[in-house]
Image (cartoon, grey):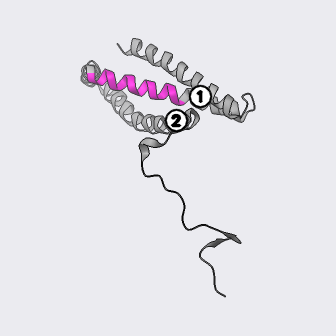
Amino acid sequence: MEQNNNSIVGKTVKKQRPVNLDLTTIRFPVTAIASILHRVSGVITFVAVGILLWILGLSLSSQEGFLVASSIMSGFFVKFIMWGILTALAYHVVVGVRHLLMDAGYLEESFEAGTRSANVSFVITVVLSILAGVLVW
């Protein structure tokens, strides 16, 4: 029995599809940007957990370890990284709650409602990011 490579479960697949290799011409909707950033913030948060646990372990190891951890955390570059970690965590939590509300049926799952809730998520994250900056500095 000969199998047709162009057929998947009885449907014919076109061999030639349009391909756009110029990424500068692609316009993502705000909902797609929110989804992509949610995944990126999850990766940042995952990596940050290791860094934060290392600093916590160092600070709890001894009095000298605490002083070393305090001196590490007092630098501008480290404070900027901490602000970035807190901003990524805030965004991940806010958009995660947005997804939970949609899954529970509290938010309508239309394109307009998704766009509106994504924009609200961005605004809430900016406010939380400013508050994180006040906390860090």
What amino acid is found at the position of numbered circle 1 in the picture? Ala
Using the rendered view, name the quadrant where residue 98 is placed: top right
Q: Is residue 106 magenta?
A: no
Depicted 15 relative to depicted 65: above or below = below
Q: How dense is the environment of label 1, judged by Cα within 10 Å: few (below 14), some, or many (20 and up)?
A: many
- Name the residue tied to disc 1: 118
Residue assigned mark 2: 33
Find the magenta span and give its range: 77-92
Q: Main secondary structure of the magenta part?
A: helix
The residue lying at 43 percent from left, 24 percent from top is 86
Q: Position of residue 100 (x, y in %)?
A: 66, 32
* Identity, as a three-letter code, of the amino acid under mark 2: Ile
- Residue occupying the point 49% across, 35% down: 37
> Seen in the image, is 20 located left or right of residue 93?
left
Q: Position of residue 99 (x, y in %)?
A: 64, 33
Which residue occupies 59% across, 28% down?
118
Residue name at image x 42 percent, y 42 percent: 24
| Camera-side residue of 7 and 102 | 7
Tell me the element at label 2: helix
